[in-house]
Amino acid sequence: MSDFSLSLNEVSKTYRSRSGKAKSEVKALLPMSLQISGDTPKVIAVAGESGSGKTTLASLLLGFQSPTSGTIDFNGVPLTALSKEQRNEFRRTVQPVLQDPFSSYNQFYKIDHVLEMPLKNYGLAKNSDESSLLIRKALSDVGLIPEQTLGRYPSQLSGGQRQRIMLARLLLCKPRLIVADEPVSMIDSSYRAIILSMLLKLKTEHQINILYITHDVATAYQISDKLIVLYKGRVVEAGDTKSIVENPKHPYTESLITSIPVPDRIRSWDKESVAIQHGLLNETGCEYTDHCQHAIPQCKSVVPNLRHFENNHLVACRLYENSSAAQPSDLAKTI
């Protein structure tokens, strides 16, 4: 299998708008470095609330948007400098799974069209017979019966079936990285475990890296090897998923985890901390200061750096700035 790497180098994204004479800007993602390679395929979860920068990160990795600063490199070449052939290879090897499986389809085409197009566009089948064989195998690999699927329109299938067809399409493309943006949030709960198990199967059996975008720490814990927690565009905690979920360091991560529902009829939900907080970006200090029970005056004026603990665990919080156990580190080396 050929080498594969996709890296973000101090990448940030700012959205600017104008209303009359007034200008405004929103910093959706603050400078971030991350490298995903094909050496050892893994599932990297990116968790955070709405507005944390998760979908912006996914859009940048897929090449749907250009960064405001920094560069994104595919196999060592900036996306802006890719040749036509290299860009075609990038589009094949870095594939999306979108949140809404229904919007991914043209409702006027049958399912067959969705599966035939990548084979045709990327020259992955020599003839129609080989194309048919590959499509039927891909459908079977995701638990669908070809005879009951082909020839039907998207509207004739359930959300879970449509999402599985998108996974079959991915198999046909032979990607090296799948960027899955909330892939189970809009499908029936009975299908969620099936889709998550299929994503894991893509990693283990097909050696595909997965970037799993979610607001749900519970599913991140279930599926991912590594976890990145975003808050207002900044990485506040990152590392091995098990270490973070079982021993969170950042107050925001603690809030996300305590917001996970558990089957406890006497649990007092009105006393639980709620993670959803919005507001303007604090560019001079920690963005979570106004909602943190551990905040000190210094938190408002100094932006905390990511620091490295045991078990590949990074956290950006003033609580650990002076800890002997924490050493300065960066995301790209940890994830």
Image (cartoon, helix red, strand yellow):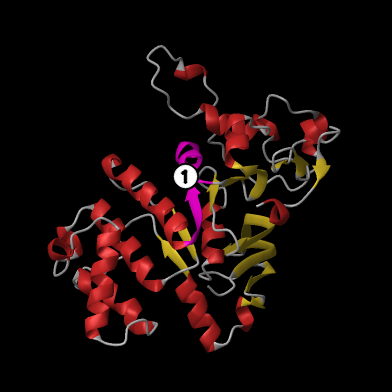
Q: Is residue 330 left or right of residue 190?
A: right
Residue 15 position within the rendered picture, expressed as x and y whole percent measured from the top left: 59, 62
Kind of residue sitting beneath label 1: Ile
> Which residue is the extreme one toward the top?
266
Tally the numbered discs.
1
Q: Quadrant of residue 110?
A: bottom left
Vertical side of 319 occupied by 169: above or below: below
Query: Is any part of residue 285 visible from this angle?
Result: no
From which residue to which does the magenta span run? 207-224
Which one is in front, 26 or 330? 330
Using a 10 Å C-alpha cutoff, classify the residue at mark 1 as few (fewer than 14 neighbours), some (14 to 19) or many (20 or more).
many
Residue sitting at x 30%, y 60%:
141
**Of residues 58 and 291, which is closer to you in this image?**
58
In the image, residue 88 above or below residue 329: below
Visible in this render: residue 205?
yes
Observer-nearest residue: 166 or 302?
A: 166
Q: Answer above or below: position of 263 versus 297.
A: above
Q: Residue at x 64, y 66 (%)?
A: 7
Query: Magenta stretch: residue 222 in it?
Result: yes
Q: Quadrant of residue 168?
A: bottom left
Q: Residue at x 67, y 36 (%)?
A: 288
Left or right, 71 with respect to 329, comes to: left
Residue 61 part of the magenta segment:
no
Could you say where residue 93 lies in the image, as x and y percent from the top left?
48, 72
Residue depicted at 57% across the width and 65% down the height = 38
Q: Which residue is mark 1?
A: 223
> Is 329 placed left or right of 99 in the picture?
right
Q: Position of residue 124 (x, y in %)?
A: 37, 81
Q: Secondary structure beneath disc 1?
A: helix
